[in-house]
Image (cartoon, grey):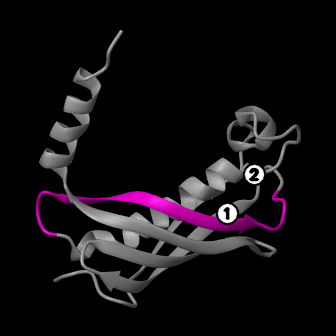
């Protein structure tokens, strides 16, 4: 079954000292870090599209436009939800939102491209080989 508009996915976590802004260096306070919120959104997006991919395929994130609107303290559960809003060839656009137990904490749009994993890795490896010292 191909990826279709409306497919949805979810990912969740708990805020710990290791995924706070001060731990990752994206800020100086012990609240859920924006880079971890972004990763949670991407994980939800992967979960939304994975069932629609063929064997040997995967997706890579290419664009993410989000806001982080509320701080979440250590100990709180956080989760992200993603829903496919458009499929144009290999490009998939998703709506992403993040929440904690008090309500929404962020949201935006995310773009992923379908790849053939072996070909993608071969191309990435060749790129590494072309490095000039």
Decide whether the magenta segment is chiefly helix, strand or loop.
strand
* Residue located 51% across and 69% down the image: 110
Which quadrant of the view contains residue 73?
A: bottom right
Specify the farthest residue to the front. 132
Specify the farthest residue to the top. 133
* Residue located 81% across and 59% down the image: 72
Q: Position of residue 87 (x, y in %)?
A: 33, 83
Q: Badge 1 is on which residue?
A: 78
Q: Is residue 62 above or below residue 67?
A: above
Q: Position of residue 88 (x, y in %)?
A: 30, 82
State whether residue 114 appears in this view: yes
Circle 2 residues within 10 Å: few <14, some 14–19, many ≥20 = many
* Residues tagged 1 and 2 counted as in contact (Cβ below 8 A): yes
Quadrant, the C terminus:
top left
Q: Badge 2 is on which residue?
A: 32
Q: Mark 1 falls on what kind of element? A: strand
Which quadrant of the view contains residue 21?
A: top right
Q: CA distance from mark 1 to mark 2?
A: 9 Å
Q: Which residues are magenta?
A: 54-72
């Amino acid at each position: 079954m191909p990826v279709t508009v409306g497919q949805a996915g979810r990912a969740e976590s708990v805020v710990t000292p290791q995924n706070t802004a001060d731990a990752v260096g994206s800020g100086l306070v012990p609240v859920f870090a924006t880079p971890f919120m972004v990763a949670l959104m991407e994980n939800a997006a992967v979960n939304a599209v994975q069932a629609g991919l063929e064997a040997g395929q995967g997706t890579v994130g290419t664009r993410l436009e989000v806001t982080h609107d509320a701080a979440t303290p250590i100990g709180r559960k956080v989760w992200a939800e993603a829903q496919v809003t458009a499929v144009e060839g290999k490009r998939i656009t998703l709506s992403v939102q993040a929440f904690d137990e008090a309500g929404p904490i962020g949201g935006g749009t995310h773009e992923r491209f379908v790849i053939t994993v072996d070909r993608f890795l071969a191309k990435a490896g060749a790129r590494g080989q072309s490095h000039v010292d």
